[in-house]
Image (tube, rainbow, N blue to C red):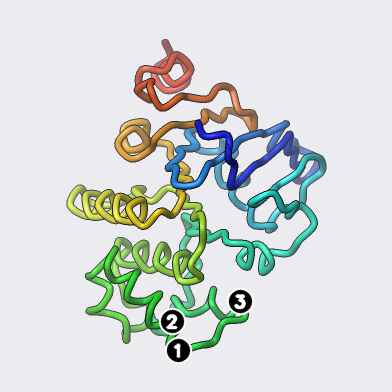
Amino acid sequence: MSQERMLELEDVSVTIDRATVLDGVSLQVAPGETVALIGRNGAGKTTTFRTVMGQTAIQNGTVRMNGTDLTSLPSRARIQHGIGFAPEDRRLFTTLTVEDNVRMPRWGKGNTSDDDFEDSLERILSIFPEMEEFLDRPAGQLSGGQQKMVTVGRALASDPDIVLVDEPFEGLAPSVRERFRDGVERIKELGISIVVAESNVRHAGEIADRGYVIERGEIVTSIDADEPIAENDEIKRIFEGA
């Protein structure tokens, strides 16, 4: 991996209701990388993302973006520092149009320029061209796959340097999963770093340059770019009982 680090978590620990949810999590993402955070449901993937975004309090450790310590900053500031987040539960405003949902991170970033938004929207539609057909529809009227496209598009609307995508393929039909893989490839072509939380080893292996394996809130191993993710010993132990 490149020594240049865009996003870095160092020894991050999180406790929720007196239970340790993350225990000394450290990981790094370099510019242009696609990194998978792989683990079973409840392993700590979503909490890791929420911690990066400032939605969960840290007991110990540090979150940095491009060398800036974000640990004590609110979520809005993290968007301003170039981090986008597409949560698994989507969190769309169902009565607002798709276009208004996509605009929201730009408002949070303090950017209300229509010209700049049109540039961002054009970039998003180059990734998910299907979205153009339902930009004026309320988000609550969309299918699950369409809502996931909007969620990722919203994460990209603030022109981030890195985007966190939580379980993008969960619950999707095979044809829609293929579209999402195409979309991820297009995001990579634009030079945006991606961290994907995945409980499906095959999906992780198809899109990620390398990965981290998380179990019970701890990073138990990292997987280098020259090692197939599915062949990693920790992956086999956790997912196959080997």
Q: Residue drawn at (30%, 66%), measured in percent from left and top?
A: 146
Q: Position of residue 144 (x, y in %)?
A: 32, 63
Which of the marked residues, 3 or 2, is nearer the chain's N terminus? 3
Instruction: Name which residue lies at 50% across and 88% down.
Output: 113
Residue drawn at (51%, 57%) of the image: 161
Q: Is residue 6 above or below residue 80?
A: above
Distance between mark 1 and mark 3 Cα atoms: 15 Å
Out of 232 and 39, give the one closest to the viewer.
232
| Depth order, front residue of 217/189 | 189
Viewer-nearest of discs 1 and 3: 1
Look at label 3 and name its amino acid: Gly
Residue 60, located in which quarter of the rendered image? top right
Return the residue at label 2. 117
Image spot of residue 241 (x, y percent):
43, 14
Q: In terms of sequence position, does the residue under pointer 1 or pointer 3 come before the other?
A: 3
Please name the amino acid that badge 2 sits on: Phe
Q: Quadrant of residue 209?
A: top left
Is residue 155 rendered to the left or right of residue 9?
Answer: left
Residue located farthest toward the left when viewing the structure as drawn? 175
**View extreme (top): residue:** 242
CA gap between label 3 and label 2 equals: 13 Å
Element type at mark 1: helix
Quadrant of the drawing holding the C terminus: top left
In front: 143, or 117?
Answer: 117
Per the image, the residue denoted by label 1 is 114
- In the structure shown, which secondary structural element does the residue marked by tag 3 occupy? helix
List the residue tagged with mark 3: 108
Mark 3, other Cα within 10 Å: few <14 / some 14–19 / many ≥20: some
